[in-house]
Image (cartoon, rainbow, N blue to C red):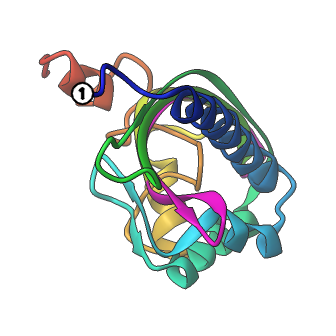
Amino acid sequence: MKLGPTLEERVRHLEDRVAIGELIARYGLVLDNRDVDAIESLFTPDARVWSADGAMDARGRQAVIEVFRGRFDLLGPSNHFTHDRIVEFDHMDPDRATGLVLAHAELQCKGQPMLAAIRYQDVYQRCEGRWRFRERGLSFMYDGGGGGGGAHRRISRRHGGGGGPPAGGGAGGGGRRAGGGNSTWQRHYGKSQ
């Protein structure tokens, strides 16, 4: 009768948790450095990147790379910061985990500064011996910036699809500024205007 995880399993989870944390940090650095070549190393071949407002949904590693490439063409400098994270391992599959990452991004669009609070909903998969994103969902809790309420939609329609926010960060969840409209935070808390 097994009473709990073995010491070996516990150590492996600790090592995996550190590796997933480094994956999350690398994501921000890759975006901030506009390192298109490194994007491939972050995602599984069947990766999906989507936004909660339904405006972005890239499926497959190549499609994900193209979405980011298009956004890099329009965005100015950016800085992505992760804060708290919750990682849960799949007890049926030792090569799979899920996570919630709280973050914010500071960036520019058309010379206007923007600040966004982001929640990433992740699925991590060990692939070719490394942890990678199998799925990364972005929920923009609010945005504040000079770009105005629908800036992320205008960027996306021209570069990489569907009207979603700039890859990895940017102006707001329902295309609204902080406190206005039907933004993600209002849907999250069950409020509507």
Q: Is residue 148 left or right of residue 33?
A: left
Asked if one can make out residue 115 in the rendered structure from this viewpoint, the answer is: no
**Quarter holding residue 50:** bottom left
In this view, the residue in front, 80 or 10, is 10
Q: Is residue 22 left or right of residue 184?
A: right
Percent position of residue 159, x then y? 56, 74
Asked if one can make out residue 175 in the rendered structure from this viewpoint, the answer is: yes
Q: Which structural element holds mark 1?
A: loop
Q: At 27% from the left edge and 56% from the top edge, which residue is drawn?
A: 54
In this view, the residue in front, 111 or 161, is 161
Q: Is residue 124 magenta?
A: yes
Q: At 54% from the left edge and 78% from the top edge, which residue is drawn?
A: 61
Percent position of residue 57, x then y? 36, 67
Percent position of residue 188, x then y? 23, 23
Rendered position, 144 above or below 41? above
Screen quadrant of the C terminus: top left
Rendered position, 116 above or below 42? above
What is the three-letter code of the residue carrying label 1?
Met
Rendered position, 176 above or below 162? above
Q: At 69% from the left edge and 47% from the top edge, which residue is drawn?
A: 23
Q: Is residue 145 left or right of residue 174?
A: right
Q: Which residue is mark 1?
A: 1
Percent position of residue 155, x then y? 55, 62
Screen quadrant of the N terminus: top left
Residue farthest along the front direction in this orientation: 1
Q: Is residue 81 magenta?
A: no
Q: Give the magenta-colored segment's residue range.
A: 110-135
